[in-house]
Amino acid sequence: MQHILNKYLDTFSWPKYGAYHLANTAIVSTFTPYSYIFMPDTPVVKKPALFETDKKSALDAISQAQFIAFAPYIFQASVLLRDSGILHEVETKRSAGITIDEVVAKVKMSPYGVRILLEAGLGIGLVYQQDNKFFLAKTGHFFLNDPMSRINTDFMRDVCYDGAQDLKKSIEEGKPHGLRHLGPWPTIYQGLSILPEPAKSSWFHFDHYYSDNAFPEALPLVFASNPKKIMDIGANTGKWTLACLEHNSQVEVGLVDLRVQLNVAEKNIADAGYSDRVQLYERNMLDPETTLPKDYDIIWMSQFLDCFSDDEIVAILEKCHAALDDSGRVFINETFWDRQRFEASALSLQMTSLYFTTMANGNSQMYDSKVFVQLIDTAGFKIVNQTDNVGLSHTILELTKK
């Protein structure tokens, strides 16, 4: 049965769904993560090729070019169709369809506004029209109802959209110039817990949606060696720490982060009643003088290293190397665009890299795993286990010292 599902998903064309949408279907929920053990006599299974051919016809290509040209209005119109309730009203009529006048009677918008937005929705592919009635298209259904699509859209609108205009300057100077639209910090990390709304809620919904989905599958991997002490670097609000403390009644966890984040995590952990099994370490991992506490069996970093440049990743991993004894292990939970099964999911990660450029820090990205593996090697580690397809799109790397 499993091989039939694999073949079905790999060969079927999903022009209006996209890869991430598949992750919420019952079919994809049947998949389990798979691992690669990095040993001399074990071949690495090659992932499906991404972006190696030009698959579009000339007509498709010129159509795609128009989507790029009008992308700002496509985005704004789509969000307004969703948030004004217009798509919801179209959806409620289902196979009967709905007229513009009927929509006007249901939403707080002029007939002109409803008309131009629904007409825009035709070209975008959110709705279709028959006999002067509008019907919800498949893309419209997912854009309206799929939690992932909503979270991604809110993140782009509330966190990234205004700052996107500063992409060129951010690349040229290696600084997140788009961040000026949210606050005065040098990077977004100093301001995460005090971001203005709705940016704050949208940022954390985006971050937690992807990382939290990986935790249930990650816990057995991390606890396979029965660790007594785990260090959580980039602990953020403490969600991984709480997952560990709930999973194992004996484990202790040390949280490493900036003070502004530790304050949030400390409260969350105290509210859950686990303060007696945690240690808090305020650290700026970019400070050359920073060292990490020792006597921890495992170091865990989830969606953390993608927040740094190549050289910074090596420096952080070298700090981890110095903190661990020879039996210690590092687990890295990341989303690599080249390890995705579908080009649409890889595209989502590639676009998220531009968020890092304009809004986060100006010099990091969602990495190609081949680049990341070289950084791991440079820092003195080797990969002993790699598990792909964790959660929605994650890869967990298990490292030991070389």
Image: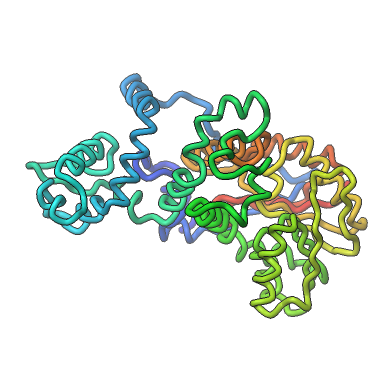
Relative placement, left or right, of 262 versus 336 is right
Residue drawn at (72%, 51%) of the image: 397
Residue at image coords 34%, 33%: 73
From the viewer's perspective, tell me whether residue 93 is left or right of residue 202: left
**Which residue shows up at 79% across the image and 50% down it?**
284
Name above or below for residue 111 compared with residue 292: above
Q: Nearer the viewer, residue 322 or 163?
A: 163
Q: Looking at the image, which is closer to me, 387 or 232?
A: 232
Q: Looking at the image, which is closer to me, 357 or 263?
A: 263
* Residue 313 x %, y %: 77, 41
Spot occupied by residue 95 in the image (x, y as percentages of width and height): 15, 54
Res. 204 visible in picture: yes
Q: Which residue is most to the left? A: 131
Residue 81: percent from left, percent from top? 28, 46
Q: Which residue is most to the top?
A: 58
- In the depicted structure, whether residue 41 falls above or below residue 202: above
Looking at the picture, tell me which residue is in the foreground, 363 or 240. Answer: 363
**Residue 4 visible (yes or no):** no
Residue most toward the front?
Answer: 184
